[in-house]
Image: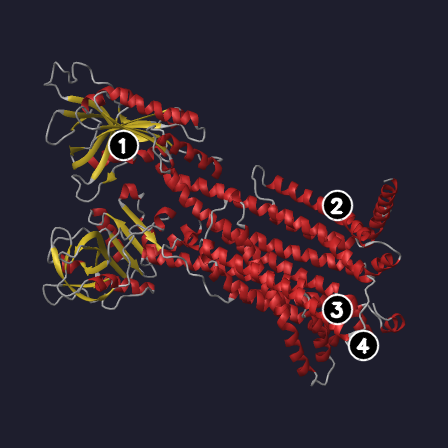
Amino acid sequence: MTDLLARTRTRARAVVAVGPLVVRRRARRDAGLLLGTALLLLGALLVALALPRLVARTADEALQGTVDRAGTDAAAVVTQLVGQQPAEAIDFVRGHVEQVWSEHPTLAPPTTVVSTRPFVVGSPSGDVIASLVMLDGVEESRPTVRWVEGREPAAVPADEQWQTDAPDRPRVVEAGLSVPAARALGVDVTDGPVTLRLDTESSGRIARVTGLYEVADPAARHWSLVPDVVAPVPTPTNALGDLRVALYVPFELREDVQVVGANRALTAVGTSFLRTDGLSVAQAHGVSAALVALGVRGQPVATNLPAVLDAFDARLTAVRAQAALVVVGIAATAASCLVLAGGLLATRRRPTLAAERARGASVASVAYRAALESVPVTLVASALAFAAVTWWLPGVTGTVTVALGIAAVAVTAPVVLAGRVAAQAWNGRRVPADRRERARLRAVGQARRLVAELTTLAVAAAALVSVRGRGLVPSGGGDADPLLAAAPVLLAACAALVVVRVAPALVRAAGRLASRSRGLAAPLAVARAHGGATAFVPLLTVTVTVALLVLSGVLVQSVDDGQRTTADVLVGADGRLDGRLDRAEGQAALDALRTAPGVTAVATGSQTTKRAYGEGSRLEATVLLVDAADLAAVRTARGLPVDAGLAGLGDATDARVPALVSPGLLARLDPDGVRLSVLVGSVELDVRGTTALAPDAGVPPVDARDVLRDVSDGDDGLVVVDRSVVAALTDVPAADRAWVSGPGTEAAIAGLDLAEPVYSGLTATTAQGWWRTWSGETLTRALTGLQLASVGALAVLAVLALVLVVVATSQERGRTLSTLRTLGLDARTARWATLGELAPLVLGGLVGGSVIGLVVPHLIADALGLAWLTGSAAGATVAVVAWPVLVAAAVLTAATLVAVGIEEGLRRRERLGEVLRVGER
């Protein structure tokens, strides 16, 4: 036992003795290379640590904007229909919503709205729809108004109010009107209160308007609960009045409201919005789960927050999936560069390591001394990177898996490569004299290499099949999807293996052509190319770099093209106008558009669903009634496809209505004599062909929940007819949408200066404006910026990789060039030697990486979630573009020139006399 311990101590001492002294001396000699490696490692760690945190912070910012836009859909709502005991019901709502708010600090203080069922109220300007509205809240959610004319409403004296023992008295409540509402109704309170009857069919309910007000903060979120309190709101088609207004009553007068609203529906709604200041994705999900749990337990709390978060999570998952490709791609390329740097360090120390090995040093001792050098460098770089990222992005967490992988490569690569050099320097192996035994050993080595290559191919194929089969997978906790992120790198490795197998044959073919050359440049270049054709790690680095560069460019272009296509599909023209076009405001807007400079065509239309198609067929169709000739002109001006026969739908030859029908409807029913219901009547169709149009989605939405929805409403197809032809035979719905085209469309729509849609009843959209809004969304904009930035980072890594390859092989190349210089080799021929060595690496990496970068997006498109980034309900199409390949070619060309320039600069200082005296350098 004692002898065993002694031998163990002796062996340990032999491995670790004087290790720090040797490492310090070597580090001082190779300080420049070690510093460069440390800077590369630091940059790679900064990217690997910062990008996941940036994605997480961007996700929080995007969620805050999404919640703001969602409004009440992202709020906690308590609703109660007030019955025989209105005071208790109102207190019930207030108590529940305030309890929910107190239990969840992420929720803002609640606002309670109590309103009556709408009345038809006569005013000096005509009948309007009006409701008595009261608002109450706590702290900053308490709505406030400024009384600018008249006085604030007060309680009605008991001797003027309806009582059970005085049923002949009217039910009276004092209320206020907003200044815009008073202007629209023609109400003037300068001479005293104005009395409005709260039902044109009865005089038993009266609202006494005592003052006019303006809201204190129109941007406050609680006003979105009752927009008619701020200003009049247009009513839907066929309503009993054109406007809806609110008769605002202070909450303290709720007893009078209860008297006036007796025997009519009175609704109390408590709403608590979600705070967006500092809101994180995790907090939002926690609140959503808590609110859903309350509803499951029978609490009267409702929310659409889960649906809002589901749509947001789908977009976020798509962003994380594509960001993972960037992070892992840059990390893999940087790790390959670290391996090249480690190989360069081991190559420079080859004579020293060989001498140590010859003097009896073990491979373990060599590896130990390499670890003493790589571990501190990695720890220092990791600490600096973590501290910098934490200082830059405080309070944000992100995955560190990729960073750990880079650090592991930085530690192990110098150790393994140094040990490999030491083992190869003197390993005691002898070459068998038997030719058959040598052939057997070569066959064993080739078999092992083939197994390794086939294993790599199998793993890449399995990853690709798995990613294609499962599609887009939600990433929990912000971690990257490892399988998806690894797929392009694995495929790039396969491409590098193919190039390594094919390149020698191509080099031999080039050698046969070069042998016919009279000069020395071509044969020398081909001779040097034999070595560069089989260098796997450099080729893998270049291939992965090009693949990720091309992949990022293809994805950027695909998302941009998809967004523009979606804008064309949703808008259907250069611009459009949606809303009550039959009202005076709508007609004025249409007239302004038709006469605006640069507007070439304007088409109006309407759409109705669930219309019977064919008698007794049980088929239902969506009917699009349009100005057919104008719509054809609009789509032509925009460059959109136009159905054959669309412009001629207005040419009716008999009592039948010309129509274009979806191919699915034509296949299911003979078109001869088909009748179609429109509103209250039906018409016989003259089917003249098919249409490629889809049901119109109405106002182009920018909410992911609406953009990707199915607008067909379950109908069996679409029927397109001309409005004027149908209107001559039966009633048609009022026009509620208009398509506008021409170079001046955007300026014309901007010149309309429309109020908010809730107040104007009109929504104007341009294709360019929709694209700017959708593409400018936080997540999409950040992803595009990340992918474009990755192109620059990968370009830098490509230059670095080629420089490392040139420097690592400079000693061997210098031996050849030094010998040839004595035979009259000039600088131009020396450059050709360097270019010949880099040619297989550059060309192979460019071809293999470009193929992978162009093909992979098509293979894993479903796993990239492009539809959620483009807004295309039909699914996004991967773009086929050449500019990423051209960028990659330009980057590699520049990198090659830089590498050759560095080589030439190093050789320029050599003198022929010194070469003759010393020999190789």
Q: Residues within 10 Å of mark 2 (few under 14, many from 20)?
A: few
Instruction: Answer left or right for 795 relative to 754.
Output: right
Mark 4 vs mark 2, CA separation in Å: 43 Å
* Residue 814: % across, % down: 79, 69
User: What kind of residue is marked 4?
Assistant: Leu
Q: Which mark is residue 586?
A: none
- As displayed, is residue 187 above or below residue 779? above
Q: Residue at x 70, y 59 (%)?
A: 340
Q: Residue at x 63, y 68 (%)?
A: 893
What is the secondary structure assignment of the residue under circle 3?
helix
Disc 2 target residue? 376
Residue 531 shows in this picture:
yes
Q: Secondary structure at mark 1?
A: strand
Task: Indicate which disc residue 904 carries.
Answer: 3
In depth, the one of 739 and 296 nearer the eye is 296
Q: Of label 4 and label 2, which has the lower sequence position? A: 2
According to the picture, the residue beneath numbered tag 4 turns out to be 820
Q: In terms of secondary structure, where does tag 4 sit?
A: helix
Q: Quadrant of residue 103?
A: top left
Residue type of the residue flagged with mark 1: Ser
Q: From the viewer's perspective, is residue 308 above or below residue 835?
A: above
Residue that label 1 marks = 178
C-alpha distance separating marks 3 and 4: 15 Å
| Marks 3 and 1, the one that precedes in the sequence | 1
Report the mark closest to the observer, 3 or 4: 4
